[in-house]
Image: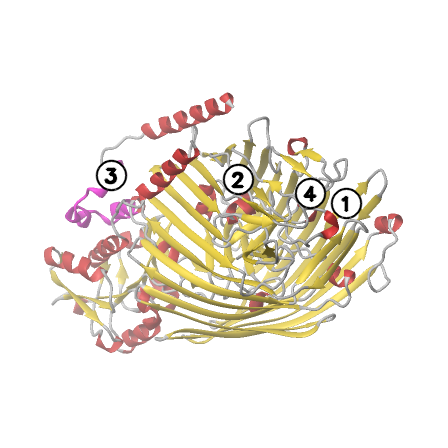
Amino acid sequence: MKMRLSILLFLLTAMTLTLRAQSDLKLQSIYLYNFTRLMAWPDGYQSGDFIITVVGNSDIIKELENIATTRKAGNQRIIVKQVRTVESIGQSHIVYLPSDESRKISDIVSYLKSNQFNTLLITDSRNATKNGAMVKFTSIENSQKYELNIKNAREAGLVPGHDIVRLAIIVD
Amino acid sequence: MKNVLSLCLIIIILAFTQVNAMGASDVRTMNRRQLKSLSHDQLLDLPLEDLVYVASKLGVSIDDLLDATTTVSSKTALSTRETPGIISVISRQDIINSGAQDLADILRTIPGIYFGYDVEGVGGIIMRGNWGHEGKVLFLIDDMELNENMYSVVQIFNHIPADQIKQVEVIRGPGSALYGGYAELGVIRITTFNGEDLKETAVYGMAGTYGSGLNRNSIGFNTGGSKQNSSWALMGTLSSAEASNGNFTSIDDKLYDLQDEWLKSNNLLINAKYSFHQLQAQFVYDDYSINPVGYGKINPNRFRNFFSQVKYNYQPTDKITITPAILYKNQTPFWFTYDLEDDFWFYKRIASQLSVISDMVWNPLHNVQVISGIGYKSDSARITEEEQQYMEESFYNDRFDVNHYTAFAYAQGSLSTRYGNFFAGARAENHSVTGNNIAPRFGYTHIYKRLNVKYLYSHAFRSPSIENVNLNPDINIERTLVNELALGYRISNNFYTTVNLYDIVIKDPIVYFFGYEDVDETYYNEDQTGSSGLEFELKAVYPLWNASFSYSYFDASKNNQSDVYGVFLPGGQLKKMMKGSPSHMLHLSGSVKLSKKMWLNPVLSWYSSRYGYLLNADEQTEVNPYMLADLNLLTKNFLIRNLDMVFSVKNILNSKYEYIQPYGFEGLEDRPIPSIPGKPLEVMLQLKYRF
């Protein structure tokens, strides 16, 4: 009896190991697409290509490229760019910084400010919004959400739309 | 038993009725399976508000665990992969899922942690094979030391109710460089709820049975709230637990039925917090008692504790935070009256400690951080007038009071570069009895894509406690050196695995000796002890389920030279083991979300054989391996709104197992040291109502 129960318990737990689910990165990429629609960039950014730059390696690149093949940011074609150094970022609408690259955040913030770029800096690394990022993805109670630092966004010349603000976790 | 099974059946049926009452129509009413079937295009077309809703139903990943910040090993928030320590973080959800009632329940599935028992049936912690109960593991409740300062112990069973705990962080290695003395083998940092967490009042109760009658129960409340600049919390829990339903045979061959309240323990914990702007104040009253066997009639052995602290977070610039704190604790451990036919024994001594501490966190550059602190602790103990009346004993200084002082300073610097995070620090102490001591610590952590690595080199020391010195004024400090290497790999967005190796050497360990013939107790410095081993973990996190598997192993043959802790076969052959502790432990636990209101949480643990002087004092007896299997069913909004239920069946296999005293002396007065039986099959129901 003991052996049967043990096997049953092992099977129950092992069975769960075979299940699969959607990744967070897919959700983050869809959030990011929503931001292209709901965030207001200055006039100079509303023509030409809509540039999303990813710093370093991240599986989100594939997700974003997938979106870029079928969707536009308003009337702008979405271009996903991958860079390895801060100096290569250039003028971008959005910069996505994976947590693996979080040590670069100060350099990126300085770089964007010194070049006076109106760029939305999004990351999922800790303390990001305190260090200059505008949006940080976070998981609360098993749910993918995002923090928004309005002050950082405004300092970058960006105006978050009503829905972005309403649905965000606002941080200072 | 039939009644118990009927009750189980009714509860399960009711719970499933709740699940089947759910409906579905659009995105807001779709079930999770329907939401998962939404195409990529459909998701892209969703308004942001709906996307947020969908995200709340999907999407958790292993990052939730890996990015969970912990402060226990660095005093500043770092992710578990970066922090300089081998860390386990047990979240509130983990605690609820496991059906845990007390600290021992919470710690049970942490790799390398096991339990033994000490004199008077008091349960204690074993860390990586080493008996950590006597001041080798630091227990903190909201950064206040739980360890009592007479003997340095913390009672582990039926102590610190899980209902008040928000999170537990465990360093499975030394923390002396930051925390000082007791953090020699590990740190258990308990964080209780604060006002921001308690936006509503909760009342809760638990009842558990081992098959006949009510064998374990608790009742309590949590309340609190917060306004713009202030918050408050008040919690109180009263719990009671019988150790088992078996019998205990004492040293003098007497049989005790544990359902006659022998070894039954009671705990009252009252916890009050208040914060205003950056000022925080807290008061905790902790009253624990256990009914030890062997005394003819029941005489509770009581541990009464008051803890309090006031601290202030001062941030003069963006880069500096200074936290001055005043802490005071007053403890009456092992308070008992043994009124026997031929003897009378009374012990009531009060130890108090006043600590003035100032911590500082300084970030001079974006990649450099310095944490430091200075402090002064004044320890005093007194033999109460009651004891003076009955007993003719004074302290080693021929007085009824004694005072020890400790001044300390610590600092740790960290540098984050593209090649990793480098940590270096030390703690220096001046103790009025043992003089000057220093515990340096070096660490390296690095995350490279999916891989992370940690190497930690830590010294630790423990100054003798008041009774250590009192019973042997020549006692020396014990010192520990630990090397740890950890590798972690993020297999995918949902899987993470880690393995760590450790080597622990404890020099001059402070060991307790009790001679029954002369009723004589003392402490002395034993030969070197320690262990080396490994711990392996695999974690998986998905929106609908999560699972965790761990294996831990230790080998004491290289580092342990002590007969007191070691396992020796007849003829003196050294085994690789330590008394009372299984060399191999396996844990498999999981949580399956059955519906938006219901989770099923199985836990399975396996422990290899253990040894102790159980049947005779000349030869150690092997105790068979055993397995524990639990099932916990959590249902939120059960029957009515805001009523949460956890229904647990623990030790489903009704395995017979026992806790062993992890130290002993060969041939001592021809007295074996009997083991204490563990809990049998237990059916438990917890209810919590929030309003």
* Mark with earlier residue (3, 1): 3
In the displayed structure, B249 sits above or below B61; it is above
What residue is shown at x 61% (from left), y 64% (from top)?
A: B561
Coordinates of residue B599 in the picture (x, y in percent): 38, 38
- Are tags 3 and 2 found on a single chain? yes
Query: How did the renderer colour the structure?
Result: secondary structure
* Mark with earlier residue (3, 2): 3
Report the residue marked by disc 4: B289
Magenta stretch, residue numbers: B28-55
Kind of residue at badge 1: Phe
Coordinates of residue B391 in the picture (x, y in percent): 86, 50
Q: Residue B450 falls in which quadrant of the image?
A: bottom left
- Are tags 3 and 1 found on a single chain? yes
In the displayed structure, A144 sits above or below B440; it is above
Q: How far apart are the two marked residues, 4 and 1, measured between alpha carbons?
A: 10 Å
Task: Judge from the rendering whether residue B539 lies leftward or rightward of residue A82; answer left or right.
Answer: right
Report the residue marked by disc 2: B201
* Mark with earlier residue (3, 4): 3
- Are tags 2 and 4 found on a single chain? yes
